[in-house]
Amino acid sequence: MPSLSWEEFLNKARSFPSSGIPVADLVRLVRQVQITPDLIEPHIAWSSDHYTRTPLLQLPALEALVLCWEDGQETVIHDHGPSCAVARVISGTTLIENFRQADAGGRPGYARLELIETCDLHPGSVCASDVGAIHSMGNRQGERRRMITLNFYSPPLSRIRTFDRETGKIGEKLYPELLETI
Ligand SMILES: [Fe+2]
């Protein structure tokens, strides 16, 4: 059961240097923190064009955003650059696909990706991507069901790589442009 209040969570997050919170520590904190509806509700926004990302928290070592996903909306395949990412499902079922780079990087600008894991996460569940991990995230529930996730990044996002699902072509995106794709 969650045992940390939001204030206690913030105090712990502030105790880490701006270089970032190790992913194992961040997973533990995100699992422990109580997320109440009044924390999330002011940050809920919906768009038929793209899932929305609304900032909830910005600290030197950590940022948090509320993501609202209409049915069928999903990220491109991406990493998180020098950041790690931890997401907690607030409502709905989140589909995560985890990939690994299956080549030695011999073709500049391209990567051959291999899908290594697919998982459905339910409300209260937490998933993590350590620095360098490659994944996608989306709402494929069908029946027009919406989904809300609370996503944490440490240190705050600065640059990412995207991977074309068909060709493996690698893209580089910097903040804030990256917010459109991740
Ligand atoms: Fe991600």
Image (cartoon, rainbow, N blue to C red):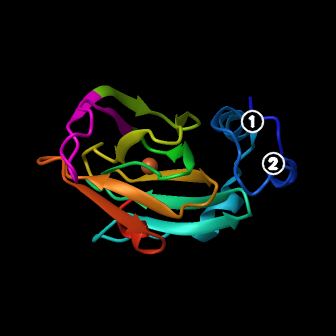
Q: Residue furthest left?
A: 166
List the residue tagged with mark 1.
32
How far is the residue under mark 2 from the one under mark 1? Answer: 8 Å
Say if residue 76 shows up in the picture: no
User: Callout 1 environment at 10 Å: few (<14), some (14 to 19), or many (20+)?
Assistant: some
Q: Earlier in the sequence, mark 2 or mark 1?
A: 2
Q: Disc 1 on helix, strand or loop?
A: helix
Answer whether labels 2 and 1 touch (C-beta < 8 Å). Answer: yes
Magenta region includes residue 169: no
At horizontal 37% and vertical 41% (from top left) the residue drawn is 135
Q: Amino acid at mark 1?
A: Gln
Say if residue 51 shows up in the picture: yes
At horizontal 34% and vertical 62% (from top left) the residue drawn is 172
Q: Which residues fall within the magenta stretch?
A: 95-115
Residue 86 placement (x, y as % from top left): 57, 43
Q: Disc 2 on helix, strand or loop?
A: helix
Residue 180 placement (x, y as % from top left): 37, 69
Q: Amino acid at mark 2?
A: Phe
Q: Nearer the viewer, residue 16 or 12?
A: 16
Height in image: 169 above or below 130? below
181 sits to left or right of 158: left
**Cβ at disc 1 under 8 Å from ligand 1:** no
At horizontal 66% and vertical 55% (from top left) the residue drawn is 37
Screen quadrant of the N terminus: top right
List the residue tagged with mark 2.
9
100 sits to left or right of 110: right
Residue 118 placement (x, y as % from top left): 33, 29
Magenta region includes residue 99: yes
